[in-house]
Image: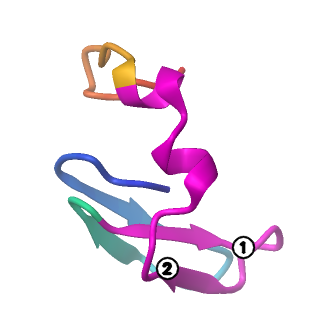
Amino acid sequence: MLVRDGTVLLRGTGIGPFELNKGEVGYLDPTGTQFIRLGLVPVFLDRDRWLRDGEPDQYGCAVR
């Protein structure tokens, strides 16, 4: 999850919630039991034109 604006809470299986704020990146592993906060934005998120230029919906989400 890359947060471009606002705050996102991630909750896994028996863990969390974990808060990510504007500019932060993190994810839950496939089992939902471990949260990982990344120090850098992965290239596939940072350079994805569709994600970068998408128009937000009524909830502020650009990805549907």
Q: Nearer the viewer, residue 5 or 17?
A: 5
Q: Secondary structure at mark 1?
A: loop
Task: Give left or right: position of 58 versus 10.
Answer: left
Identify the residue at horizontal 74%, vertical 74% (top origin).
Answer: 29
Magenta-colored span: 24-52
- Give the vertical position of 13 relative to 4 (above or below): below
- Give the vertical position of 45 relative to 15 (above or below): above
Between discs 2 and 1, the one toward the N terminus = 1
Q: Which mark is residue 32?
A: 1
Give x and y (percent) for residue 10.
Answer: 47, 66
Can you identify the residue that label 2 sits on? 38
Quarter holding residue 28: bottom right
Identify the residue at horizontal 43%, vertical 82% (top origin).
Answer: 39
Cβ atoms under marks 2 and 1 closer than 8 Å = no
Residue type at the position of mark 2: Leu
Q: Which mark is residue 2?
A: none
Residue type at the position of mark 1: Gly
Residue 34 is one of the magenta-drawn residues: yes
Q: Is residue 11 visible?
A: no
Give x and y (percent) for residue 43.
Answer: 58, 55
Task: Give left or right: position of 13 versus 17.
Answer: right
Give x and y (percent) for residue 37.
Answer: 48, 82
Q: Nearer the viewer, mark 2 or mark 1?
A: 2
Whole-number angstrom distance, CA of label 2 to CA of label 1: 16 Å
Tell me the crowding category of disc 2: few under 14, some 14 to 19, or many 20 or more residues within 10 angstroms, Cα based: few
